[in-house]
Image: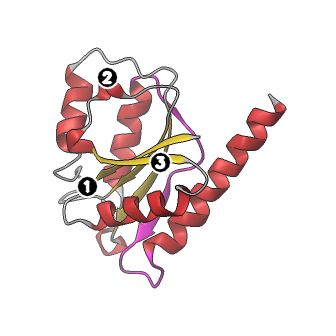
């Protein structure tokens, strides 16, 4: 399967996790990894499954590297029908009112343009004991396994 791991980051944590996901999947899939800041929404296609890793910054805002993508997505007449994505959010539950809102807002922007979210949005709490990759890698493996089963049945 062709997979593009996209990340939106402020301090580099989402980028590191995106690279971990890429490494974990590249033996079985054709995987690329890109910063959302360098991604044109018009370049997203239905042939590629998009795995999005996004942190939250400030008062529940998108991180700096995701904001240009979100702006281009809102400013253009981008039709993301046929685009499938999964999204993983990073945040800190110490800020409970805005916890992982960056990924929540980004998922809403994808869906508002017609993209289809596959699987539930999963999140990591930086103030918890788990490492983000210990949550994200089983999550994406399960999503891909379920997609494979659905394709075989379909």
Give me the residue at 39% from left, 65% from top: 17
Colour convention of the picture = secondary structure
123 relative to 59 in the view: left or right: right
142 relative to 7 in the view: left or right: right
* Residue marked by disc 1: 60
* Residue marked by disc 2: 42
Q: Earlier in the sequence, mark 1 or mark 3?
A: 3
Q: Earlier in the sequence, mark 2 or mark 1?
A: 2
The residue tagged with tag 2: helix, strand or loop?
helix
Relative image position of residue 108 (x, y in whole percent): 40, 36
Badge 2 vs badge 1, beta-carbon distance below 8 Å: no
The residue tagged with tag 1: helix, strand or loop?
loop
Which range is magenta? Answer: 113-131
Relative image position of residue 145 (x, y in whole percent): 70, 50
Using the image, tell me which numbered label, if any, was put on residue 99: none
The residue tagged with tag 3: helix, strand or loop?
strand
Give me the residue at 41% from left, 41% from top: 107
Badge 3 vs badge 2, beta-carbon distance below 8 Å: no
Q: What secondary structure is the magenta-colored segment mainly?
A: loop
Q: Is residue 126 magenta?
A: yes
């Amino acid at each position: 399967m062709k997979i593009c791991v996209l990340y939106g980051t402020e301090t580099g944590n989402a980028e590191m996790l995106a690279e971990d996901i890429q490494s974990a999947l590249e033996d079985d899939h054709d995987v690329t990894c890109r910063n959302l800041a360098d991604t044109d929404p018009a370049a997203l296609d239905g042939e590629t499954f998009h795995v999005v890793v996004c942190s939250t910054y400030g008062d529940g805002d998108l991180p700096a590297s995701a904001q240009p993508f979100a702006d281009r997505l809102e400013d253009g007449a981008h039709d993301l029908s046929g685009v499938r994505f999964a999204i993983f959010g990073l945040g800190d539950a110490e800020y409970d009112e805005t916890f992982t809102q960056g990924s929540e807002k980004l998922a809403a922007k994808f869906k508002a343009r017609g993209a289809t979210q596959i699987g539930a949005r999963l999140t990591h709490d930086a103030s918890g004991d788990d490492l983000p990759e210990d949550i994200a890698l089983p999550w994406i493996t399960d999503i891909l396994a379920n997609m494979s089963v659905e394709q075989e049945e379909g």
